[in-house]
Image (cartoon, rainbow, N blue to C red):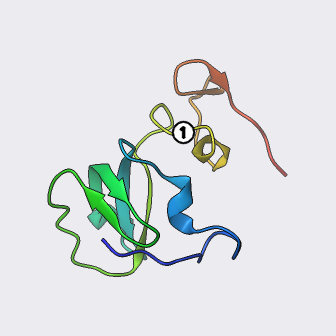
Amino acid sequence: MIIALNTYSPTSTTDSAYFKAGDRVDYLPTGNEDAGVIGLIIQTITTTKITFTSPHGVAVVDGTIEPTTYINADPDHKQDGYISSAAGVLGVADESKEYS
């Protein structure tokens, strides 16, 4: 899968720098996240190319990749927004945070 160089990151880094081999991610097409491809595992990354361990089947060229769940997200990705349980817990034990 070919990805944008720095759509979501500053020009001093690349979007692919926020992922690494072994990360489990979902591909979510823009405007149709219900048609996403879930549970992809990254095999290798170059500057703008991500190779997965199995065929990804992505047919739409506009979308994003993100961790499948909060539990398997890297610390950088845990800074993104996640919905907590009714008890205010993220994953297994992390307390949710309120942002204004």
Q: In which quarter of the image is residue 98?
A: top right
Residue toward you, 62 or 81: 62
User: From this viewpoint, which residue is outermost toward the front?
Assistant: 46
User: Could you tell me the amino acid type at mark 1?
Assistant: Asp
The front one of 95 and 8 is 8
Classify 27 as above or below 94: below
Taking depth in this image into account, of 40 and 52 the one nearest to the observer is 52
For image coordinates 35% across by 41% down, the residue present is 22
Q: Where is residue 80 in the image (x, y as percent from the top left)?
A: 63, 50
Does residue 98 appear left or right of residue 66 in this picture? Answer: right
Q: Residue at x 20, y 50 (%)?
A: 53
For label 1, the residue is 74
**Residue at 36%, 70% in the rendered image:** 49
Give the image quarter of residue 96: top right
Q: Is residue 16 left or right of residue 2?
A: right
Q: Is residue 94 above or below residue 76?
A: above
Q: Residue at x 32, y 51 (%)?
A: 42
Number of on-image labels = 1
Question: Residue 33 at what x, y percent from top left?
Answer: 37, 65
The residue lying furthest to the bottom in this view is 61
Q: Residue 47, how many percent across, how many down?
A: 47, 69
Quadrant of image for the N terminus: bottom left
